[in-house]
Amino acid sequence: MQFKTKDFSEAREVLKVRDLRIGLSGRPQAKPVIDGIDLTIRAGETHCLVGESGSGKSVTSLAAMGLLPKSALEVQSGSITLDDFEITSASHAQMRQLRARRIAMIFQEPMTALNPVLRVGEQIMEVLNMHSDLSQSEAKKRTLDMMDQVHLPDVNRIFSAFPHQLSGGQRQRIMIAMALILDPDLLIADEPTTALDVTTQLQILKLIAEMQERHGTAVLFITHDMGVVAEIADTVTVMQQGKIVERAPIEKLLTKPEKEYTRTLLTAVPNLTPRPARAAASQSEVVRVAGLDMTYGGGGFLRRSEGVKAAQDVSFTIKPGRTLGIVGESGSGKSTVARAIMRLIDPTAGSVNVAGTEIAKLSRRQLRDHRKHLQIVFQDPYRSLNPRWTVARSLCEGPINFGTPREEAMRHAAELMELVDLPRDALDRYPHQFSGGQRQRIAIARAVAMKPDLLVADEAVSALDVSVQAQVLDLLDDIQEKFGVAMLFITHDLRVAAQICDEVLVMQRGQVVEYGPAGDVLANPHHDYTRNLIEAAPGRHWDFANYRALGSATMTTGATA
Amino acid sequence: MIEQHQSRHSAFQVLTGLLSLPAGARVGIGPLLAALILLAIVLASILAPLYVPYDPLAMNSAARLKPPSEEYLLGTDPYGRDTFSRVMTGGRVSLLIGVGAALVSVAIGLAIGLVAGFFRVADGIIMRIMDSLMAIPAILLAIALVALNGPSLGSVIIAITVPEVPRVVRLVRSVVLSAREEPYVEAAIALGSSMPKILIQHLMPNTMAPLIVQGTYICASAILIEAILSFLGAGVSTEIPTWGNIMAEGRTYFQIKPGLIFWPGLLLSLCILSINLLGDTARDLLDPRMKKREG
C-alpha cells in the first residue's frame, strides 16, 4: 500500500485551530461538545478528521465555516484563524466575504446542497457573480472551464441541466466545481463520498486529490471510513467525544497507533480478505430461489408500458447455517430481491421455496402462516421499531400473532434480550432511549423471536459506526451458530460481505453477474464488474486490524491487477 | 415512595410516548390564559342551572327591555327574559354542539381515513366521494341538512359534522399514507400481524396528534357555524337558547339594547379564540419539527 508521505512542515499554515471549546448556547456549565481541540492544516495538505458519530467532527468543520447553529451551539473559548484572520469573532459580512473566496465546503448529500429549481451552471455562476466583477460572458466561460476541470462530460449540456437530471457523482462534481471556482485556500469536505457508490467514490476521491494538486488547496476531509483515510490522507486526527485522541501522519497512524481508541477503531474495520466458508448445518437447502423476476410498473390500461426490470432471473440456494451475501451498488436490485423473497412485494415471476413451501404465489392470507419462517432486519434502526411501543411489546408482537400466550412470549422476550446482550430491565423502555446499535440488536431479537429458517438482513449494519458494526456482525454470527438459521445478507460494502458471507452473489442493474463461494468471488473475480467493485474499495491493500499491508499471499493476482 | 415516583414517571413516559411530546416542553403565558378562560366558560355553562336567577324561557311582560340592574344583572330582552340566565344557559348548548360535532366528525373521519389510506382499491372511491362533499359550500350544505331533518340539536350536529368529515379524512389518509411506508410497518407484516391489527395498533396512533389539533379547530368552527345557522334561523329552535339564536333575536333591538348581542358575542369570541389558541399550542407541541428544535 502506497501512502502519501510528502512533508508539509515547510508549507504555510492555512488553518489554525487553538484550544477550541464549543458548548451548548447559553449553558456554559454543560459538558462542551468540542473540548479544547487543536488543529493545523498546511497549504496543499489533506488532513483527515475521523471519528464515530457524535465525536464532534462535523461541528468542528461548521465552526471553521462560521456556520454554527447560533440557537444551539456557540464558541466558548479558543481561536480559529485562517491565515491570521480570526474566524470566531468575524462579523456576518466578513464571513460572507471569506466563504467561497478563501474557504469552501462540500457536503455529503449533493442533492440537498444544490438548489433543485436552478440550473446547475447558473448555480456555479452565481458564486462568481457574487464574489467577482467578471462580465456575464467571462463568468460563463470560467464556469464551463471549471466544469471541464472536474471532468464533467458534455459541459454545455450539463450547464443547463437541473440537479435531478444528473447522477450522484455528477452532482458532487458540480459541488466541487462550485467550491473551487474561486480558488479558495481551504476546502472542507464533510463526508463527501459517503452517499455515493464505491466506484463513484473512487472517482470523486481522485478528483479531489487532482484539484488539490492543481490549486495547492488545503483540504480538511471529514470521514468515518478508514479505507478512505488510507487512500487520501497526509495527516490524520482521530476524535472521540469532542476531544482529540491522536494526531499523526497517515503511515504512522495505521502502522503504529499509540492510543487505545485508535486501535479499537482500526481493529473494527472489517478485512477485505474473505473468511473461510463454514460448514453447512445440514446438506438440504432451506431456501431455493429460481428464476425470480421483478418488474415495477408495466401494464398500463391503454398502452402497454415497458416497466422497470429491477431483478431478472435471480436464482440461488442457501443451506441452514450459511450466509449468502448479495452485493451490488445502488439500483442493482439487491433490495428488490430481499423484499420479493420476504413477499413485502409480489415477484412478477419465479419461485421462492422456503422450508419446503413455495411462497411466491401464495395469497396474502395463506402467506401469513408462513411468515414465521422468514424474518427481516432493516437498515435504519431508527425507523424499524415502532417509536410508541415498548421493547417488550415489539418483541412479543410476532409470537403472539402465532398463538403464543402473552406470559410465555414475555419470558421469551427477556431471554432474547440476554441473547442480544441487552439488560432484561430494558424491556419496558422505548426505542428512543437506545442508541442505534442497541436498537439494531432489538430489531434482530424481534426477528429471532420467530425462530425463522431464513433471516434476511437488508443493509443491516450500514447505518452503524464501525465499532458497533463489528459487534452487530459478531452477534449475527453467534445467532447463526446457535440456531443454524440461513442468512441472506444484502450489502453494498465488500468488507462486510467478506467478513460474514460464505457465498456471494454480485448484482448489476437487476442481473446476477457472478455467484459463487465468497473466497472465489472476492479473491478471484471473473466478471469485470466484480473486479471494478473490488478495485474501487478504498484502502483495499491494507489490513487495518493488524496494522500491516495485506500479504500478497492472501490477495491473488485477479484482485491486485 | 420511590416506587410510586417511578410508576408516575413511567405513566408520564407513556403519555409523552403516545403524543410524542418532547420532554420538558414549555408553554407560554398566552395558552395558559386561554386554558383558564375556556375552563371558566365551560364550568360556568355546565353549572348554569345551579346559579342562574331566572328560568331562561320564562317571559315577563312587566320587565321588557330593562337595563342592567341588581335584579337583572345584564338586563332583559323584549320578552322580559333575563339576559344573564339566557346567555349562561345558552353556552351549554353551544359548547355541546362544538364538542359533539368535533368528536363525531373526528371519529367518522378517522375510520374512513384509515381505510382510504391503507387499502388502495377503496382509496379512489372514498376520496372522490369526499371531494364532491368538499365541493359544496359548508354553510349551504348545513342549511340544506337542517331543512331536511328539522331544527333539532341532533340535526344541527349532523349538519355541522358532514362538511367537516372530508377534511378529517384527508388528514388521516395523508398520515397513514406516509406511515405505512415506515419499516416498522413492514416488519409487522413480516411478523404476521393481520391488517386490522396493523391499522389500529401501528398506524392509528400516528394520527392522534394531528387529530387532536384538527379536533379543536372543528370544535371552534362548529360553535361558530351553529351561531351562524341560528342567526339565519336554520339552527336549533328558539325554545333552546344558544349564543347564536340569542344574538339573532337581539338584532332587531340592537340599537336600543346592544347588550343583547354584545354579551353572547363576547363569550362566543372568547371561547373560539381560546380554543384556537390551544389548538395552535397543541400543534406546535406535537409537531415533530418543533420537537427537534427544542430537543
Image (spheres, rainbow, N blue to C red):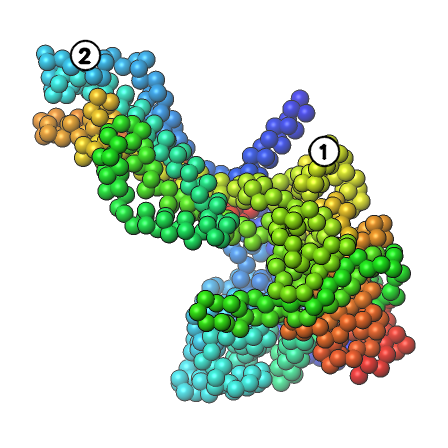
| Residue A112 drawn above or below residue A388 | below
Mark 1 residue type = Pro
Q: Which quarter of the figure has residue A465?
A: bottom right
Tell me which chain the residue with mark 1 is part of: A
Q: Is residue A159 above or below residue B22?
A: below
* Residue A405, label in figure: 1
Q: What's the distance in space between the residues labelled 1 and 2, CA to CA?
A: 69 Å
- Let me know if residue A368 appears in the view: yes
Q: Position of residue B242 (x, y in %)?
A: 25, 26
> Which residue is depicted at the point 70% across and 49% down?
A370
Q: Amino acid at mark 2?
A: Glu
Q: Nearer the viewer, residue A227 or B247?
A: B247
- The residue under label 2 is B71
Q: Percent from the top left, x then y, of residue A458?
A: 69, 59
Q: Quadrant of residue A204?
A: bottom right
Q: Chain of mark 2?
A: B
Q: Secondary structure at mark 1?
A: loop
The quadrant in which residue A19 appears is: bottom right
